[in-house]
Amino acid sequence: MSEPVKVAILGCGMRGQFMYAPFSKLRPDLMKLVAVAEPDQAKREEIAQEYDLPSDKCFFSAEDFLAQPKMADVVFLCTQDRQHVSQAVAALDKGYHLMLEKPAATTVEDCETILAAANRNNSKVAVCHVLRYTMFYQLIKFYIQSGRIGDVMSVNQLEQVGWWHMAHSFVRGNWRNSDESCPMILAKSCHDMDIIRWLVGKPCKRVSSFGSLGHFNAEHAPYGAAERCLDGCKAKDGCPYDAEKIYIFERYGSVESHYSRSGALTEDRSLEGVYKALRTGPYGRCVYHCDNNVVDHQVVNLEFEDNITAAFTMCAFTGEFSRKTEIYGTRGSIRGDMAENKLYLTTFGQPTEVIDVAEYTTDFSGHGGGDNKMMTEFLEYVRGDRPMSNTLTTLETSIESHKMALLAEESRVHGGQPVDIH
């Protein structure tokens, strides 16, 4: 039997700690966690205890880890977006294979720098565009390739960010400011650019985009709003974004309420610890008085080869947290909602066929089951148990979706002027 792949996780935030690391327990035959790097000491010690890691395999930073002799087969790079290029190149030059959290980097040039390092070291690199691995999108791809709807002519893709998730990650959180991370279209929606490109199956030629930060700013603060939710805010009762409701009372039953318990706000997960974090940290700020600058709604038009068109909408102002997809072909159409996990296949002149995704898989954990499938395929690919599949998102493939996102942002900034993709 093949040995499990030795993995080091650099950056133990929500993805590193709660998705990648647990896979070593789910599939110990395939993955062995051997090292981590995480600047938060409490989190680092918690992971070390849970996964029985010795102190000399736990590092403060990615740079500290990469300064050591090689100690794993694969690095999972889950640090902040702007750190990726230098850390990825260092890991590849050290001889590691690499799984890159999306976005791979914040510029096309940096993506190409990482790709050059991968090529010169003959390393295997993937980008975690997990939507490709979900049964939901694999079935859509299957029915497109089957010819049931003829030739694809147009695609509509909707990303419903969810009002609570927008507030947590893109107003108060790490991805709120493009000067520190990257534009919203890349940070959140490079998944969508990738899945549209994969479903169409042809290169994108031109993009245009409109969008703005339309609501989460001081201009829209309700009367009496305080700088922080716990500082005597007079608008508190009627505000859905009140941090105490979301992170402590969980009055809305939101899917993001687990952040309080998972350590995203603070490693001190006691009631007193969370209150302290809300009084002093970024997640207790009023959503109308943050230093955010990323858009809260955006549309993108895309033109592909053979006159295929696609339209993408990202919207923060949704009560649902899902993606909806519609594919229009010359002989039929497919539409589906990831939250519902059903597809509706219409062949012109025939009754609509309802396809229940649950009949094809029982794993709807992490991104509709995409996380576990991605991990399995990538680690088997690294170990040599499977060839590279068309599902696996290599860095070379991913660069095109990064271009689509970054040029869409260029178009948006310049008033929607169309931009050619070369």
Image (cartoon, grey):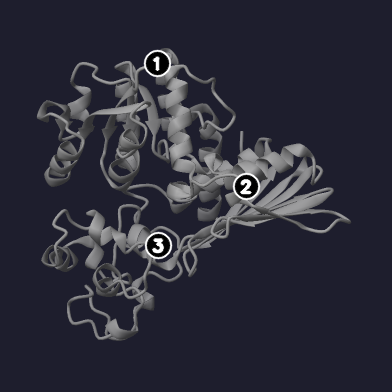
Quarter-wise, where is residue 19 in the image?
Answer: top left
Q: Of the residues under marks 3 and 2, which one precedes in the sequence?
A: 3
For residue 166, which numbered disc appears in the image?
3
- Along the horizontal axis of the image, is 363 left or right of 151? left
- Quadrant of the image containing the N terminus: top left
| Mark 2 Cα shell of 10 Å, populated few (<14), some (14-19), many (≥20) | many
Q: Which marked residue is nearer to the observer: mark 3 or mark 1?
A: 1
For residue 1, which numbered disc appears in the image?
1
Quarter-wise, where is residue 266 in the image?
Answer: bottom left
Residue type, numbered disc 1: Met
| Mark 3 Cα shell of 10 Å, populated few (<14), some (14-19), many (≥20) | many
Residue type, numbered disc 3: Met
Q: Of the residues under marks 2 and 1, which one precedes in the sequence?
A: 1
Q: In the structure shown, which secondary structural element does the residue marked by tag 1 occupy?
A: loop
Q: Name the residue under label 2.
A: 207
Residue type, numbered disc 2: Val
From what the image shows, is residue 180 above or below residue 6?
A: below
For residue 78, which numbered disc appears in the image?
none
The residue that appears at 57% across and 44% down in the rendered structure is 135
- Along the horizontal axis of the image, is 186 left or right of 12? right
Q: Which marked residue is nearer to the observer: mark 3 or mark 2?
A: 3
Give how far across and how far down residue 29 sits, in percent.
36, 26
Give how far across and how far down residue 131 sits, in percent.
53, 44
- Contact? badges 2 and 1 (CB < 8 Å): no
